[in-house]
């Protein structure tokens, strides 16, 4: 279990560095409408609280699964998700925000991960939380972290599609027709 705990701390530190140090996010949640703001805050606080509880109870609810194979797969998924999230931020540059808003001069980005899906940043979070639950070997984390967080990001992706369609119109609709929302080739 020591290897799992060490890997977990490495991933959580890497997550913090990627999210708040390498590319400083533009917090635009205050500019969102009230309903969107509640959803965005939930997408931040639900995972934060459940990760804290999962880490605090790892000794009781975590496990090394299939000789560590599942835990290693979880670690690799976390690393891949962090890489995808960073790629998203690098691709969008100043247009990357934490909050669903339209910015001045907003353009549709069709390069980088946005060639494949409309919301790769949300996909990265979903993959990260799945990886984290596998890394911890915790079915409780799967139930209370991965599933609720995934549902929140699915809702946010739909909300963002709606908002961008209202703000940008036909250009965004054309972009949407050729790309899945979150899972390439599926949805």
Image (cartoon, helix red, strand yellow):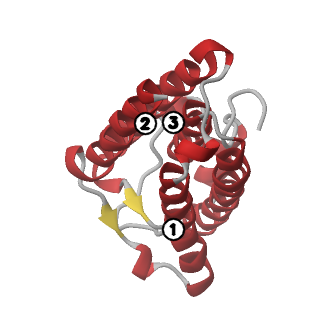
Of residue 133 and residue 138, the one placed in the foreground of this image is 138
The crowding category of the residue bearing disc 1, from other C-alpha atoms within 10 Å (few below 14, some 14 to 19, many at least 20), is few
In front here: 184 or 154?
Answer: 154
Rendered-image quadrant of the C terminus: top right
In primary-sequence order, the first of circles 3 and 2 is 2
Asked whether residue 59 appears in the rendered view, the answer is yes
**Are the two marked residues, 3 and 2, in contact with CB atoms closer than 8 angstroms?**
no
How far is disc 3 from disc 1 in space, using C-alphas?
Answer: 26 Å
Q: Which mark is residue 45?
A: 1
In the picture, residue 162 is in which quadrant?
bottom right
Residue ID at (72%, 40%)? 177
Residue sitting at the far front: 60
Identify the residue position indicated by label 2 in the image. 8
The picture places residue 70, in percent across and down from the top left corner, at: 63, 21
* Coordinates of residue 108 in the picture (x, y in percent): 47, 48
Discs 3/2, front: 2
Regarding mark 1 in the picture, which secondary structure is present there? helix
3 or 1: tag closer to the N-terminus: 1
Judge by depth and name the residue closer to the eye, 138 or 78: 138
Above or below, 135 relative to 99: above
Q: Name the residue under label 3.
A: 114
Q: Which mark is residue 140?
A: none
Residue 33: x, y in percent? Answer: 55, 83
């Amino acid at each position: 279990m020591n290897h799992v705990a060490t890997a977990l701390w490495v991933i959580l530190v890497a997550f913090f560095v990627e999210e708040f140090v390498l590319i400083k996010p533009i917090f635009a949640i205050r500019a969102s409408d009230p309903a969107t703001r509640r959803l965005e805050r939930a997408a931040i606080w639900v995972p934060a609280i459940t990760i804290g509880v999962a880490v605090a109870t790892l000794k009781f609810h975590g496990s090394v699964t299939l000789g560590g194979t599942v835990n290693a797969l979880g670690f690799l998924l976390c690393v891949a998700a962090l890489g995808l999230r960073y790629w998203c931020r690098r691709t969008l540059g100043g247009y990357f925000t934490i909050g669903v808003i339209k910015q001045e001069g907003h353009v549709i980005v069709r390069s980088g991960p946005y060639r494949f899906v409309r919301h790769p940043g949300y996909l990265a979070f979903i993959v990260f939380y799945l990886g984290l639950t596998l890394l911890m070997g915790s079915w409780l984390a799967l139930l209370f972290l991965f599933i609720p967080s995934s549902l929140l990001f699915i809702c946010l992706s739909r909300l963002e599609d709606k908002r961008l369609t209202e703000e940008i119109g036909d250009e965004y609709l054309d972009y949407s027709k050729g790309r899945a929302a979150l899972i390439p080739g599926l949805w």
